[in-house]
Amino acid sequence: MTQYFGYLSGIFITCSFIPYVISIFRGQAKPERASWFIWSALGGIAFFSQLSKGARYSLWLPGIQTVGDISIFLFSIKYGMGGVSKRDKLALSIAGLGLILWYITQEAAIALFFAIFIDAIGAFLTILKSYEHPTTEPIIAWIFTMLGGFFAIFAVGGWNWTLLSFPVYTFVANLFIIGSIKLGQARNNI
C-alpha cells in the first residue's frame, strides 16, 4: 500500500510544477529566486540522505521535487523576483552556514534535519513574498505540493521520524505558503 501513496505523492509533486511553469510564461508567477536556489540545492541532500536511511516509496517526493525546483530556479533567473535584498542575502548566508554544519557532521540524518531547516529559510522567504505579492504565486501549485507531502507521509509506512520528517515538513510548509497567499489576497481584497 505504501507504494501507492508514493506514486500519489509523485503525481501531485509533478502536477505542482505544471501550473507554476504555465503561470511563469503567462507573466503571473514570479518565483522568489533565493527560495528556489535554496530548494534546488537542498532537495538533492534530502533525497540522498533519505535514500541512505532506507527510504523507498517516499523518495518520489524529494526526487521529483528536486528536478522541478531546479527547473523553476532556472526560470526565476529571467522571470523571478528577489535574490539581492538584505533578507535574501541573510537567508542565503544562514543556509550556507547550515550547509557547513551539515558537512562537519557527516551524518545523513543530521544532514536531513539541516536540509529541512535550510529549506524552511527558503519557505520563509516565499511566505513573506506570497503575503506581500499574493498574485505572483499560483496557489494551485502549492496545494499540489502540500498534497504531495501529505501522501508521502503515508508512503513512509511506519513511525520512523527520520523518514517522516521531510514529508511532514513539506506538508506544513506548503500549508503556510497557501495561508500567506490567502492572507495576502484578503489584505489586498483580491
Image (cartoon, rainbow, N blue to C red):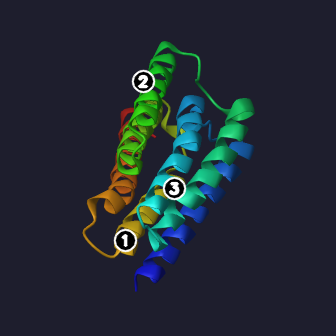
Of the image marks 1 and 3, the number of the one nearer the N terminus = 3
Q: Residue at point 47% right, 51% down?
A: 46
Q: Is residue 124 visible?
A: no
SS type, badge 1: helix
Say which amino acid is labelled 1. Answer: Val
Which label sits on residue 94? 2
In the image, 109: left or right of 17? left
The local crowd at label 3, few if under 14, some if 14 to 19, many if 20 or more residues have their Cα within 10 Å, is many
In this view, 94 is above or below 187? above
The local crowd at label 1, few if under 14, some if 14 to 19, many if 20 or more residues have their Cα within 10 Å, is many
Say which amino acid is labelled 3. Answer: Phe
Q: Residue at point 71% right, 39% down?
A: 74
Nearest the eye: 98 or 149: 98
How far apart are labels 3 and 2 at the CA level?
21 Å
Q: Residue at point 54% right, 69% down?
A: 10
In this view, 77 is above or below 3? above
Say which amino acid is labelled 2. Answer: Ile
In which quarter of the view is residue 98 placed? Answer: top left
Nearest the eye: 135 or 6: 6
Identify residue for label 3: 47
Of the image marks 2 and 1, the number of the one nearer the N terminus = 2
Looking at the picture, how far across and down is residue 2, in whole percent? 40, 80
Which label sits on residue 168? none
In the image, 140: left or right of 166? right
Give the total number of marks visible in the rendering. 3
User: Where does the N terminus fall, quadrant-wise?
Assistant: bottom left
Q: Are marks 3 and 2 in contact (CB under 8 Å)?
A: no
Identify residue for label 1: 156
Looking at the picture, how far across and down is residue 144, in whole percent? 49, 61
